[in-house]
Image: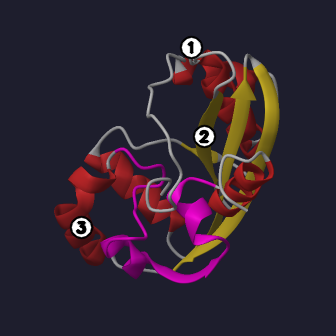
Amino acid sequence: MLDAAGVPFEAVPAPLDEEEAKAGLAGAGFDPRGLAEMLAELKAKSVEAAAGALVLGCDQTLETADGDMLSKPGSRGEAFRQLRGLSGSTHRLHSAAALVREGETVWRACETAALTMRPFSDAFLETYLDREYEAIRHNVGGYRIEGLGAQLFEAIDGSHFAILGLPLLPLLAVLRERGVLAA
């Protein structure tokens, strides 16, 4: 998304133990939205960067209709169970980003999208997973709306970019304000 939007960047893996951080934040009582926000910030703060460089950290959480949070499915069977549980209901994706400069958070944003999955049959779900499992196995919720996963939904309310994992428009706005992008 950043490349397509003309944002200069260098991808650097964050050395944060995400599962440990997630467990600690959940144990401290963070809700799914707050968890996405804090994970984005912790990821950005964990990256060693040149003096003055802006570091972008991002994270996304999926909150079910009953307030539970889903993680990336650990197996095809888990992906099936997650999708079966989401079928016929509305869930929320919280996409957060944080900019950090020299260890200090200088900007944060989080956008939430509501996605309503249509009811679908087990046969449809098996066919979907036959075709998509390798592509979605690292995706929270077990789908990609930019692929065959679009067929899982009957309604979507929210930013397409947030669903893909980044509150891009607010990020572009702050990068223009800071002179990183032309205004």
Quadrant in which residue 36 is drawn = top right
> Which residue type does callout 2 highlight?
Cys
Mark 2 or mark 3, which has the lower sequence index? 2
Mark 3 or mark 1, which has the lower sequence index? 1
Residue 138 placement, left or right of 104: left
Which mark is drawn over residue 58? 2
Q: Is residue 176 above or below residue 178?
A: below
Q: Magenta stretch?
A: 138-166
Q: From the viewer's side, name the closer residue of 48 and 34.
A: 48
Which mark is drawn over residue 126? 3
Quadrant (top left, top right, bottom left, bottom right) of the C terminus: bottom right
Dot in front, 2 or 3: 2
Identify the element where label 3 is drawn.
helix
Residue at the disc numbered 1: 48
> Which residue type does callout 1 highlight?
Glu
Q: Residue at x 24, y 62 (%)?
A: 132
In 3D space, how far apart are the residues under numbered discs 2 and 3 (Cα atoms)? 31 Å
Regarding residue 141, the answer to whether it shows in the image is yes
In 3D space, how far apart are the residues under numbered discs 3 and 1 (Cα atoms)? 43 Å
Residue 34 placement, left or right of 91: right
